[in-house]
Image (spheres, coloured by chain):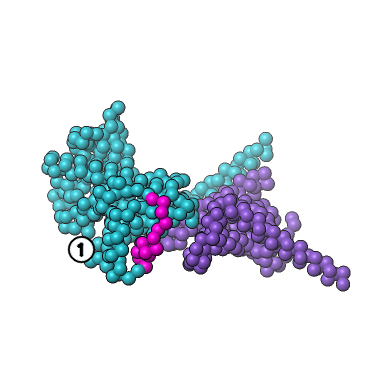
Chain colours: A cyan, B purple
Amino acid sequence: MKEIIKITVALTISCLVAGSVMGGVFILTAKAKKQNEHLNMQQTMFGLLEPEPPQKSEFSTADLNLYNVYRYIIEDNDKTYLGYMVPVKQDTRTAYDLLIIDLKGKLTDQHKLDLLPEAAREEQDRGTAIANALGSQKRAKYADTMIIAKLNDKRVAYLLPGEFPGFKTFIHAMAALDADFNILGLEIMAHEEDPGLGGEIEKKYFKNQFKGKTFEKLRQLKVIKEPLPEEYRQYLERKISQEDMAGIGKKYQDADIHAITGATISSSCVTNGLKRMVKKFVYRIKILDRVISEKDIHSVI
Amino acid sequence: MPVTTKTNKQLFVNGLLNENPIFRLALSMCPAVGISTTVMNGILLGIAVLFVQVFSSCTISLIKNHIHPRIRIPTYTLTIATWVTVIDLVLAAYMPVAYKAMGIFVRLIVAFAIITMRLEVFACKNDFAPSFWDGMGMGFGFMFGMVVLGAIREILGMGTLLGYDILGFRPLLFFVLPAAGFFTVGFMMAIFNYAETLYSRRRKEEKVV
């Protein structure tokens, strides 16, 4: 009996010590970690928006304004609505409105959110503000984010962070579209595919294949099991001179996606995931835009 | 309490060759087989293991007198987990570049047999300095093993070394798959065993003469 008490006490103390060490380090590093993640995300976003050397940039990424629109799924008893948290102009500062749209695309409700721009970035703060606005009956679940890049008053690009199933687990990616929904680029942020096989999805020769595909082409994009032609590979890895770039780029403009050797499933997962992500986004943004213009909402997006 | 009689240098070489974690002790085979697809992976996981092993060994050797013998394994696991979390958080906060490359490896470590085994066999019986050197030896031994495995598999599987194209083609794609890890580990073990027999035979002959 004495033994067991001794063991319990010893184990409890060790756990407490270990826990407080971990907690202390977490508190000390949390801020820097968040900062890094934010920086990393921003770098990825600007990297996607920055055009490559041969093309002239129409804008500098520093002049762009990025607006996040958060999408929530709202459950009200048996009914499902979509909630879009949209930045709106209020006097001189930015505020946030929650637009509740039913599945047919009709605006059913509109709430003002009590949220400051700094707090809007935090998922937790957003959740609380939305829950307060909705009342206790409805439940909101965060779905995804879309980022709209504007130059002055003109939309120049959309950024879509998202995830889709890969060969093993989820692949986290970010796609960039221009104002006509053509693909500006794809970046793989995190994945757990096999190194050397599915892991090659993060290599330039794969992800650059999506670059420049039009929305029309993307809708019927296929994965083909053909070896990558050498000049195309050189082009994708950006290893050729700038004069040749345009010619080869044009030649393969409408090419389907060449699967990675030994990783056909990962290749088609990315292709289909991107397709789904973009198609859904285009559908959603069109509805959202229509609602905003019909109801005369002073949104900044 | 049996305290080691080896010098620090002997302890270090012991981990590197005589008791190499992968090739001689055959511990931590899951990462050795699963991750050693490239040299870079080997180096990164090696660094991660080195840090956790050294820190855990030192911690355990310091607190060894206070550990209740019946809960020593949970205590080791706690120690390792704490160090893994601390290293993970610190890397994420202050070295984002290194974290990007090493993050997934660091989090893998908690369940590594080699670390727990070294704590049980060595650190809980010895003082701080020998434990430190034993940890260093084991860490570098593990890294050495991973790099050798990674080099063999990378060059045979992908035709590259450290990401640089060397062969220009992929001789055997099979070698990047986990199953090939077993072949490579087995092959390297055979070499190590053979070298040991040769060595001990020569010593015997020297004694006879």
Residue ranking furthest to the top: A78
Image: A269 above or below A186: above
Front residue of A2 and A44: A44
Question: For the point 31% across and 63% down, which residue is it?
Answer: A248
Question: Where residue B10 sits: x, y (%)?
Answer: 70, 67
The answer to whether any part of residue A158 appears in the image is no
Q: Quadrant location of the C terminus of chain B?
A: bottom right
Question: Where residue B67 sits: x, y (%)?
Answer: 64, 49
Question: Where residue B82 sits: x, y (%)?
Answer: 53, 52
Q: Amino acid at mark 1?
A: Glu
Question: For the point 20% across and 41% down, which residue is it?
Answer: A287
Would you say A278 lies left or right of B193 here? left
Image: magenta residue range: A224-239
Residue assigned mark 1: A58
The answer to whether any part of residue A263 appears in the image is yes
Image: A61 above or below A9: below
Q: How many marks?
A: 1
**Chain ID for label 1?**
A
In what element is the residue under mark 1? loop
Question: For the point 31% across and 52% down, which residue is it?
Answer: A175
How dense is the environment of label 1, judged by Cα within 10 Å: few (below 14), some, or many (20 and up)?
Answer: few
